[in-house]
């Protein structure tokens, strides 16, 4: 990338768009997305903000678009299995909101279950850290003698509660049901849905030379019906490895090759920060490298070349505002 192109892209990254698009509606600003809230629909606007250890640290060029389009890809590829929250183009006069804007999704407002439904195919990340220290993983006691990055015979579900403030808390499914957070039959339905989404995710990833290692789903109810909401199988909500060489690296006890934001987190940890105190300033070369990783992830996962829907921020704000006026309010 030429230096001035890179500088322009860094300059153009979008911190927020919800405010401009809102047309008088309430805007909820998540860490990464701005949510414009109508009565029955929402416009989710994926910004370029990057968070790690629950803190927003910088913006990454194209990140919002990459994530919104990967999520749209997976919703399309799994719609036959589990209904999702997207409003289909046939309900908007043929307008495909994500294709038109790159980074927005028009969705049905759901009554969200306050649970992050984490599905794991391999013993990695925080599950491995818990296991290594002899702690159960979301209440599951796993067999002894497992190694880091080992594949489970079948994927496991390790939920956490979604806390309004503070860090999420791991819980077991039994505890969720016993404490009345999710009703028993609904939880069984959630588990079935999550496992079938994950199986499809693993199958399609495998065809692209990737391993879908673990992921997080958020479910909600629309008119009493279970839908998968939020985003699915994106690099922010999932861990992917390259399949090629997995077994060799596993046998040699080497780290797996990742396709996700772990490299960004690693940089932070190498610079002495893992969530406490003042974070280090994020240099532009790390922002550019991270942008390239996200673009590579888009191309690896979808098999398409990433050509940004190249709207300038003003044009994008206008088109988002039009969508809000026509389809959210
Ligand atoms: N269909 C939907 N109906 C209602 N709320 C939704 C729906 N889809 C997603 N959400 C919510 O919208 C918000 C999206 O914003 P975002 O993910 O940036 O916020 P966050 O969850 O606070 O941050 P982070 O994901 O970094 O923890 C989340 O709170 C998510 O639960
Ligand atoms: Mg979120």
Image: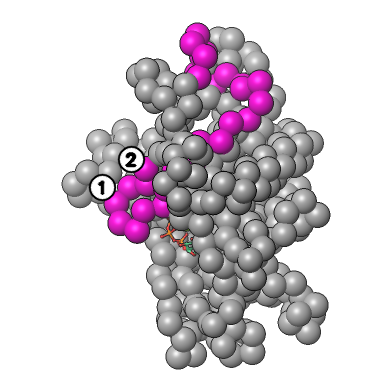
Residue 86 is situated, as x and y percent measured from the top left of the image, at: 67, 67
Q: Is residue 248 left or right of residue 30?
A: right
Residue 230, quarter of the rendered image = bottom right
Residue 97 is situated, as x and y percent measured from the top left of the image, at: 68, 74
Residue designated by label 1: 280
Circle 2 sits in a helix, a strand or a loop, which is it? helix
Q: Is residue 158 above or below residue 164?
A: above
Q: Is mark 1 within 8 Å of ligand 1?
A: no
User: Closest to the observer: 2 or 34?
Assistant: 34
| 161 magenta-colored | yes
| 187 magenta-colored | no
Residue 102, quarter of the rendered image = bottom right
Q: Where, quadrant-wise, is the N terminus in this rendering?
A: bottom right
Which residue is at 45% across, 90% downward?
24
**Structural crowding at the residue carrying mark 1, measured as other residues with C-alpha within 10 Å and reported as few (<14), some (14–19) or many (≥20):** few
Q: CA distance from mark 1 to mark 2?
A: 7 Å
Q: Is residue 68 above or below residue 299?
A: below
Residue 26 seen in render: yes
Residue 315 seen in render: no
Mark 1 in CB contact with mark 2 (< 8 angstroms):
yes
Q: Is residue 325 above or below residue 187?
A: below
Q: Where, quadrant-wise, is the C terminus in this rendering?
A: bottom right
Which residue is at 76% across, 37% downward?
203
The label number, if any, that marks residue 79 in the structure image: none
**Structural crowding at the residue carrying mark 2, measured as other residues with C-alpha within 10 Å and reported as few (<14), some (14–19) or many (≥20):** some
Which residue is at 49% across, 78% downward?
36
Residue designated by label 2: 268
Residue 57 is situated, as x and y percent measured from the top left of the image, at: 34, 55
Q: Which residues are magenta?
A: 142-169
Q: Is residue 197 above or below residue 224?
A: above
Circle 1 sits in a helix, a strand or a loop, which is it? loop
């Amino acid at each position: 990338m030429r230096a001035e192109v890179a500088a322009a892209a860094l300059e153009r990254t979008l911190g927020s768009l919800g405010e401009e698009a809102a047309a008088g509606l309430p805007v909820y600003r998540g860490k990464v997305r701005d949510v414009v809230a109508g009565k029955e629909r929402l416009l989710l606007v994926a910004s370029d903000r990057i968070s790690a250890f629950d803190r927003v640290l910088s913006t990454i060029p194209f990140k919002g678009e990459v994530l919104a389009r990967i999520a749209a890809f997976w919703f399309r590829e799994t719609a036959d299995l589990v209904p999702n929250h997207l409003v289909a183009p046939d309900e908007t006069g043929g307008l495909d909101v994500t294709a038109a804007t790159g980074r927005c999704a028009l969705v049905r407002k759901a009554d969200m279950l306050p649970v992050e439904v984490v599905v794991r195919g391999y013993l990695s990340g925080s599950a491995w850290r818990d296991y290594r220290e002899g702690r159960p993983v979301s209440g599951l006691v796993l067999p002894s003698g497992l190694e880091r990055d080992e594949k489970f015979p079948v994927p496991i579900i390790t939920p956490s509660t979604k806390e309004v403030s503070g860090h999420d808390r791991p819980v077991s499914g039994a505890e969720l049901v016993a404490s009345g957070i999710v009703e028993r039959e609904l939880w069984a339905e959630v588990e079935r849905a999550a496992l079938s989404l994950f199986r499809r995710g693993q199958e399609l990833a495998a065809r692209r030379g990737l391993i879908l290692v673990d992921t997080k789903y958020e479910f909600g109810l629309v008119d009493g019906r279970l839908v998968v909401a939020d985003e699915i199988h994106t690099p922010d909500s999932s861990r992917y490895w390259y399949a090629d060489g997995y077994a060799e690296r596993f046998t040699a006890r080497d780290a797996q090759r990742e396709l996700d934001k772990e490299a960004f987190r690693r940089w932070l940890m190498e610079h002495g920060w893992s969530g406490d105190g003042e974070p280090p300033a994020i240099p532009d070369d790390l922002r550019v490298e991270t942008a390239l990783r996200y673009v590579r992830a888009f191309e690896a996962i979808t098999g398409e070349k990433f050509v940004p829907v190249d709207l300038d921020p003003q044009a994008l704000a206008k088109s988002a505002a039009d969508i809000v006026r026509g389809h959210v309010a």
